[in-house]
Amino acid sequence: MGGICFGAKREEAGIGCSCEIVYRMDQTARWIIFSSPRTVRSRLEAMGFASVFIALVIERGFTGLRLSKRLTNKEWAGIKRHAIRAIKECEQLYIESFCVREGERIVSSYRSWYECHDPGNEFWPPPPKIWTLDAIKDSLIEILRPNFHHLQGVDDYPEPPDITIDTLAPRFENIVNNHSISSRAELLGLVPVESRLSSVQETLELARTLFISSRFEPARYPCFAFANHWRWDERGSVIISDIIILAGHDPNVMTFAQLLEENIWVECLTCAQGNVLQAPEAVGHFHRHHPHLECVEWRILEGQELETTRAPNAEKRWSCLLCGYWKTCTEDLILEHIASQHPFARPDLQYCYMSVHGELPRKPMAHATGVSTANS
Ligand SMILES: [Zn+2]
Ligand SMILES: [Zn+2]
């Protein structure tokens, strides 16, 4: 016994024809108002929101919500935006809690993928930092959203099926490559035109390509997803160029990897106590101790003096890119850590970097053969 829309009848009642209230004739042939299903709940259901979130916003309430009253189009128009905002907040809370709960599983899923792929020259975030990419969360939401309808009772935070994480994995490559492309473009955009070489890669690999954060931390490969307040480190770039020239090399050619390889040490002649530093550390030293000086004098250590300085300072802080472990001092120890803690990691790739000098991308191991060395 379906209801019938009688526009004229409604106009008579001063409601206008909106098909909101349906009239039907009762047994005594009188017109009675038939309660239409146009409630807040059915409106939101019709918009595709999941019932768990609808139940939650109705329970919590929102501006204009009047459950006892049937809704006309006009009334709905008045509260619609409040309802939508409330339900989106609800969804967002669920997504946030999902991300917190599933964070470790997502990191470990990404780690498994990362361990057996060679990033070459790409700027892929190491596993512990995968969450810094907005695209990961966006992708997760896209996967989660169709599953909202299967959720039962949001208060208990039901486990979504494992498929959610499994579905994310095939997207890793695209996500991290896109991140890499945009990070490089962003970095290059910060480098003054006169300091660029012919390719992005060459420019970024130069030892004198330096950036600085708002906290005056110099870096070569700043992680844009992590802190996007990087700018070109003009003075740092001049300092490292001066040191490279003093040491007899060409700053327009020398890469950061070569600079580390050369293991150049300098003494800051501006400091009364004669501070001795490894070349990449000189930039940080300048920013911390002489930020107001126009120029700082350096002396390159040579011969016996260099040998005696290098030896006790040979140990550097290495980090494991796969898990963030860093409490070791030599590359050998970190490689042992990788072998024991990450048995599935591709054996021909190093998964570590010297964290003191910023991100030096992992590279194929020196003794490996038949492996791409594009990033070394
Ligand atoms: Zn100094
Ligand atoms: Zn590790």
Image: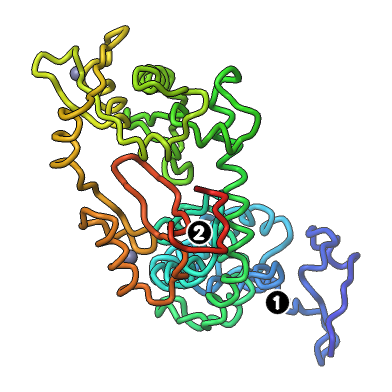
Asked which quadrant contains residue 4, the reply is bottom right
Which residue in the protein does label 2 denote? 89
Residue kind at label 1, given as amino acid type: Pro
Residue kind at label 2, given as amino acid type: Glu
| Residue drawn at 47 percent across, 66 percent down | 348
Does mark 1's beta carbon lie closer than 8 Å to ligand 2? no
| Residue drawn at 24 percent across, 49 percent down | 317
| Relative height, residue 247 to residue 334 (above, below) | above
SS at mark 2 in the image? helix
* Quadrant location of the N terminus in the rendered image: bottom right
Q: Would residue 295 be found to the left or right of residue 359 on screen? A: left
Within 10 Å of disc 2 (Cα), the crowding (few <14, some 14-19, many 20+) is: some
Nearer the observer, 44 or 339: 339
Q: Would residue 17 be found to the left or right of residue 58 on screen? A: right
Nearer the observer, 94 or 69: 94
Q: Position of residue 93 (x, y in %)?
A: 45, 63
Q: Would residue 263 be found to the left or right of residue 32 on screen? A: left
| Residue farthest to the top, as pictured | 294
Give the label on residue 37, or none.
1
